[in-house]
Structures are given as structure tokens and as C-alpha cells.
Amino acid sequence: MTVHHDLTAAGVTTRAATTLTSITRSTAARCKARRAAAPSPSLDAATERPMPANKLTAAERHQVLSMLNCDRFVDQAPLEVYAQLLDEGTYLCSVSTMYRILRENTQVAERRRQARHPARVCPELVADAPRQVYTWDITKLPGPAKGAYYDAYVMVDIYSRYIVGVHVQTRESGLLAVEFMTEIFAVHGIPNVVHADRGTSMTSKPVATLLADLEVTRSHSRPKVSNDNPYSESLFKTLKYGPAFPQRFGSIHHARQFMDSFVTWYNHEHRHSGIGLHTPADVHFGLAAQKAAERSSVLADARRSHPERFTAASATTPKILDLPTATWINKPATDVGIEPAADQAAA
């Protein structure tokens, strides 16, 4: 207690003093108040608690710890040990004392053998051109009745945001995923990397075999980290929050027709904020540079016609029209102490 008071008197914060001495601030404050009310040179000695008469001796505490850690009881909870010893006519101490002794020896934890899963590596992917990194996922489309759903397999190029393929099926399957990928690769070419989450279809053996045969690198999100697949998640939000998305699909044919029309609109009409407000098709097929030049020409004509409507800061093309040079999933942090974060995939 004296050390705590000396630290605070020297200018150390009470929080830091509590950390260093393990004496709570409330206890130190009460002791300080009592000292101020009745100063006494032996106050600390007087406030020390006497040894409880029912406290176990050091030998007894060692006996309890040895019993809990013996081969017979090492995998059992203290409550079970307590009950078994009572059934055998032995009483060592209460259950709370067992926990107290274990806590003093930093053994209050899961005593049974547990699976230790290795830490998952954070995926870090970059694309500076189309057809380098594809990401895909499966989303549920509500069917005609409650509990009935269709599965939409959707793959998108992360650089151009171009939807390279959509299949609507009645179930999830690794074989259907292989058929889905094979058709896309035949039309749009084989990418360097295919990224997905850890669904059963994504991690299935048929998919792994196909990508290995094509020498395509497989990449997977970390478990329960949706930000590791931001482009697919963003695409699904654009799909399901759109005004035309129905409450239910009457049939699988209805779902397929709707997805076809959505893909046409998304690829060729939707101005995506993540790619300089170009359409995914313009970026995917290399037309964005020409479009950007035409936009700059229009803006230059407008500045010459009405210079009073533009400031010096608007003399260049707005940043919202800039096409990114590279697209990342979990771009590495450049500053020490900053955690990597998934790039925004705003739709």
C-alpha cells in the first residue's frame, strides 16, 4: 500500500500505479482517507488482515494442487474431482478453494485437450489489369415458397468489377461449381488467382482439382471474415437492394431471366464508383481510357465556355473519375501500427 501511495505522490497516475502494485484504486483511496482522518505511523501494519484460521497451510495447498494435476484428475473439472473424492471418503477443500489454488498457479483454463487451429493467413491479392484475379461466391435467391431457395453462382473480376459469369442452380455442389468455372474460363480466359470464401463448394475437391490442373492459384477468406471477399459481397448488396429485385422468384426460369437482365445492366450501364464511374465493360475491354479522354474534353469545353463557374481547384479532372491503377483485397499497411483493411468495393 505504501508503494502505491509513493507512486501517486511522485506523479504516477492511479491507473499506472494500480497496474504496477495490483492494488485497486478504490482500496488505495480508502486507505488514504483513513490515514488522513487518523494519522498513525503504524497504519499499514494495523490495516493488514490477520491470517484466517481456516486457511490451508502451504503443505495442504501443495497437496490439493498435486491431486488436481495427477494423471487421474488432470483432465477433469474441479467440481468432478471434488465429487469423486467425497464418494471415496476424502475431503481436501471446497470447490472454490480448488479454483483459487489453480488460479494462483495460472491453471484456470480448459483442462481437457482441445483442438488448436492454426492462425489463418490474411489473403493479400492485387490486380492491375483485367483477367488477373477473379472472386466468386454463392448467394441465395428466395423461391416461390417459404424455405425454398435457388443458388446463384456469381464470379466477378476484381479490377474491372465485370461479372464474368452467373449460373442459377437448385443446389450448391462442387461439380456444378466446376461446370460454372469451366464455362467462364473458356470465354474470358484463365486468371492467375481465383478467390472465394470457405463454403463447401469453394473448398470442394472437384474445384481444387480443376484449379490445380489449370495452374490457377487458389485463395480463400479467413473463417468468419466477410471483408476478405468484399467485391462479391458488394455485388450482392447491389443486386438485392435494387428496386427491381423481387420479393420471391416464381420459378428457377424466372430467377435466371432476372439474373441475366441484372448482369447486362450491371456490366454495360451501371457506373461503378470504384472504377472512376465507368461501366465494368468499358474497363474490362480497355475502353475506359478513351472514355476518360472524352470526359476531360467535355469538362475543358465547359471551363472555356463558363470560366466563372469553375475554381482553380477544379482545373483538373475530378478524382471521382480517376481509374485506380491497382485493386487490392487486404492491401498491406504502409504505416507501422495500422492494421491492413480490405479495399472498399462500393457499388
Image (cartoon, rainbow, N blue to C red):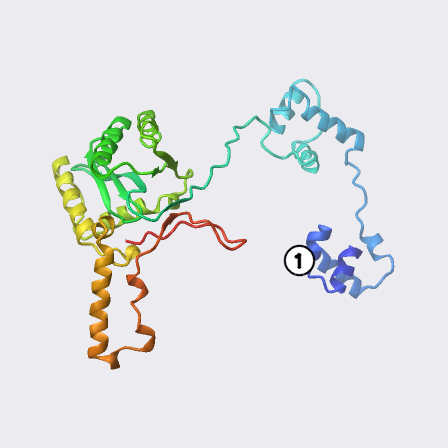
Mark 1: give few (<14), some (14-19) or many (20+) Cα within 10 Å.
Answer: few
Question: Which quadrant does the N terminus fall into?
Answer: bottom right
Please, what secondary structure does the residue beneath circle 1 have? helix
Is residue 172 visible in the rendered structure shown here?
A: no
x, y percent for residue 332: 46, 49
x, y percent for residue 99: 66, 34
Is residue 68 toward the left or the right of residue 290 in the image? right
Residue placed most toward the observer, 15 or 201? 201
Residue at the image point whose x is 80% and y is 56% from the top = 2
x, y percent for residue 10: 76, 64
Residue at the image point whose x is 54% and y is 28% from the top = 114
Residue placed most toward the observer, 236 or 140? 236
Q: Residue 219 falls in which quadrant of the image?
A: top left
Is residue 41 visible in the rendered structure shown here?
A: yes
x, y percent for residue 31: 75, 58
Q: Residue 75 falls in which quadrant of the image?
A: top right
Is residue 250 toward the left or the right of residue 103 in the image? left
| Total labels drawn | 1
Above or below, 81 relative to 323 = above
Q: Residue furthest bottom?
A: 308
Residue on which disc 1 sits: 15
Residue placed most toward the observer, 293 or 73? 293
Residue at the image point whose x is 21% and y is 52% from the top = 282
Q: Residue furthest top?
A: 88
Residue at the image point whose x is 86% and y is 61% from the top = 40
Q: Residue furthest right?
A: 41
Above or below, 16 relative to 192 = below
Residue placed most toward the observer, 55 or 60? 60
Which residue type does callout 1 highlight? Arg
Is residue 22 toward the left or the right of residue 128 in the image? right
